[in-house]
Structures are given as C-alpha cells and as structure tokens.
Image: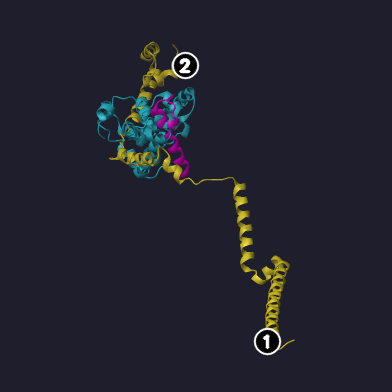
Chain colours: A yellow, B cyan
C-alpha cells in the first residue's frame, strides 16, 4: 500500500475502528514507513491527550432532584401535565372580535336604560297606550259615580213620595 | 434509589417501555445511567456547574415528557444526547459561550483521574494543555465531533445521530479536525523549541 492510500485510514486505525483485515494491512505499512509511523504516533498523542480529560460526575443528589420533578408531573396527570396547565387556552382572533362587539353593544343598551329618565322612557315607550287606559278608567269611575248619585237621588224621591211630601 | 440492583439488568428499551406503561419510578434508573455524561456535556458548554445542572435536568425532563413519542428506532442514549446537545446549542446561541468557570475544568484535566487509562498518567500535562488550546480554536463543526468522540466517548453512529448529519460527514470532519490539531500541535512544539524550553 502507498502512503496516500494509508493516510485516510490512520485516524480510524488509531481509534481501533478498522476491521481486522484492513488494520493488519495498515499496521504492516506503518512498520515499514517512517512518515506514516510518525503520523500514527502524532494521531495517538492527540487521541490520548483528548481522552485523558477529567472524569466529570453529576452533582450529588442530581437524580433525586430530577425524579422530584418527574413525580410531580406524573401526579399532575402525566408527562407535560404541568406544562399544559400553565398554557392558556387560545381562541381564534375572530372569536375575540365578536366577543368584544357583543360586550360593547350590551354596555350601550345598559347605559341607555340606566341613564334615560323614567318619564321620558314612558313617553318614548308608548304614551298613547297609557292615555287610553286612563280615559277608560276615568269613564268607568265617572259612570260609577253618576250611577251612585242617581241611585241615591231616586232613593230619596221614593221615600218622599211614600211620605206624601211629593205628589 | 431502592431495588437498583435488579434494574441494572434491564436494557434501556425495556426501561422506557415500562415507564411508558406507567412505572414512572423506573425512569430513575435511566437518570442514574446517563446523569454523568449528560452533565459533563452540559458543563463543557456552559461552564458554571449550577447552569450545567439546570441544563442537564431539563434534558432529562424533556426526555421523560417525550417518551410517548420516542419510537425506539434509535438508542435511548443517542436520543438523550441529542436532546442535551440541542439544549446546549440553544444555550450557547443565547449566551454566546461558556462562563469563566471552564478554566477550572481545563486545569482539572492535568490531574488525571485514576480511572483513566494508566498510560495517561505518563503523558506530558503541557501537551494535553496544548492540544486542548488547539481544540478551542477549531471551527464549531470540527470541535463538536472531536468533543463527542473523545470527551463523551460516543461512536461515529451516535455522533451522526446527535448532530443529525450523515456518517460520512462525521468521518470527514474528524479527519479534518485531527489534521488541524496535528498541524497546530507541531507548530506549538516548534515554537517551544525555538523559545528554548
């Protein structure tokens, strides 16, 4: 194998990621080639320098803190339940526009009914109906009064006739 | 967490199925399995441990909430790392980069953890610092693949899934990133020799 053919495989060779047959071919070339052997040594130094990084561990109690939140979500109704409760219901914009218009109209009707005087309202609502009712009632009252008066006079006249005062 | 011994035998797929079926407590096992790499990824982005914990917690909560829609066509770990990566990218867009606390993380690397390969104990700490400085200077596209491969110990397939790019793109970016790092490392070595170190 030539150096140009070996070059793309050197990193994988150093990482131990080549299959056995290809690895043995590369190894045979590296043993006999000073340049490629230097390449393998350099790649190995880089790999070891990076792999020798500090072992980082999660803080003490990390798993318990995670499960604390997980259990709270599970009790609230399953994964994401806490999130769904916090998320507000969103309706289409046209619904909000119609709702607003209805509120404005209702407020207007209420304002009109509260602030217009009752007499004016009565006039506006139908004075004709009220006048007709009044004349009808008064007619009945007058008639009753006349009937009553008429009966009273007739009674007196009958008595006087009986007495002989009136012939 | 009680009963974790038996739970360790369950696969991620079995755990996610049972959490979806209502066994919420089993999600704790998934948190314990992946809390370290998720927190580590978050801290590399944001710097401050407090912010990293908030971000890591949010990643797990999003995974829990999204379990109903998780079809299992990818590994749970890959899906979780992708959620974390996207959160980190959003955080970076909002805040512009990690806070000063990352310097503590960088210098901590010079004191290699005993769980790392023994060979790492023999490495020159200055060389590690040089490589990391070169890494910081990389374009984001190249730095992300290198970070996920070496720091998060992901496979090429996982990196492709997390970054949502084809596998070939991952291979190409890694090749170019390492080439840039190698050139940068050689350049700083020459400068060091010229300076008479």
Residue B148 point in image, percent of width and height: 40, 30
Query: Who's the residue at 70% across and 80% down the image?
Result: A154
Question: Which residues lie in the magenta part?
Answer: B68-96
Outermost residue, right side: A167
Work out which quarter of the rendered image holds the C terminus of chain B and state it. top left
Instruction: Please say whether residue B87 is one of the residues in the magenta stretch.
Output: yes
Q: Which residue is mark 2?
A: A4
Give the prevailing secondary structure in the magenta stretch: helix
Q: Secondary structure at mark 2?
A: helix
Residue A32 point in image, percent of width and height: 37, 13
Nearer to me, B65 or A114: A114
Work out which quarter of the rendered image holds the N terminus of chain B and state it. top left
Instruction: Identify the image quadrant of residue B184.
Output: top left
Instruction: Please say whether residue B2 is one of the residues in the magenta stretch.
Output: no
Q: Tell me whether circle 1 and circle 2 mark residues in contact (CB < 8 Å).
A: no
Please give the chain letter of the residue carrying mark 2.
A
Q: Which residue is mark 1?
A: A163
Q: Is residue A102 above or below residue A153?
A: above
| 1 and 2 marks on the same chain | yes
Instruction: Identify the image quadrant of residue B55.
Output: top left
Whether residue A71 is visible to the viewer of this picture, yes or no, is yes
Q: Secondary structure at mark 1?
A: helix
Q: Is residue B106 left or right of residue B137?
A: left
Mark-to-mark CA distance, 1 and 2: 161 Å
Whether residue B194 is visible to the viewer of this picture, yes or no, is no
Identify the mark nearer the N-term, 1 or 2: 2
């Amino acid at each position: 194998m030539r150096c140009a053919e070996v070059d793309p495989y050197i990193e994988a060779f150093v990482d131990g990621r080549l299959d056995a047959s290809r690895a043995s071919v590369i190894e045979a070339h590296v043993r006999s080639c000073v340049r490629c052997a230097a390449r393998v040594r350099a790649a190995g130094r880089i790999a070891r320098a990076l792999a020798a990084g500090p072992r980082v561990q999660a803080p003490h109690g990390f798993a318990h803190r995670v499960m604390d939140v997980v259990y709270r979500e599970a009790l609230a109704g399953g994964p994401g339940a806490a999130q769904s409760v916090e998320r507000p219901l969103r309706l289409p914009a046209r619904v909000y526009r119609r709702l607003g218009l209805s509120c404005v109209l209702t407020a207007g009707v209420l304002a009109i009914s509260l602030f217009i005087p009752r007499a004016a309202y009565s006039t506006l609502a139908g004075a004709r109906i009220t006048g007709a009712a009044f004349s009808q009632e008064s007619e009945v009252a007058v008639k009753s009064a006349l009937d009553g008066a008429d009966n009273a006079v007739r009674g007196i006249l009958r008595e006087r006739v009986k007495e002989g005062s009136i012939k | 967490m009680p009963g974790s011994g038996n739970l360790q035998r369950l696969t991620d797929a079995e755990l996610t199925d049972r959490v979806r079926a209502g066994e919420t407590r089993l999600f704790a096992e998934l948190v314990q399995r992946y809390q370290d790499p998720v927190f580590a990824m978050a801290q590399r982005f944001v710097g401050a441990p407090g912010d990293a914990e908030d971000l890591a917690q949010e990643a797990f909560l999003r995974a829990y909430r999204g379990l109903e829609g998780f079809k299992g066509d990818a590994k749970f770990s890959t899906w979780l790392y992708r959620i974390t990566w996207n959160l980190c990218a959003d955080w970076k867009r909002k805040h512009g980069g990690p806070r000063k606390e990352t310097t503590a993380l960088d210098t901590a690397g010079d004191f290699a953890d005993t769980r790392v390969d023994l060979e790492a104990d023999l490495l020159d700490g200055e060389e590690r610092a040089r490589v990391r400085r070169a890494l910081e200077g990389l374009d984001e596209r190249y730095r992300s693949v290198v970070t996920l491969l070496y720091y998060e110990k992901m496979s090429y397939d996982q990196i492709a899934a997390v970054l949502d790019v084809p596998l070939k793109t991952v291979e190409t970016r890694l090749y170019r990133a390492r080439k840039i790092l190698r050139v940068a490392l050689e350049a700083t070595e020459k400068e060091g020799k010229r300076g008479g170190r």
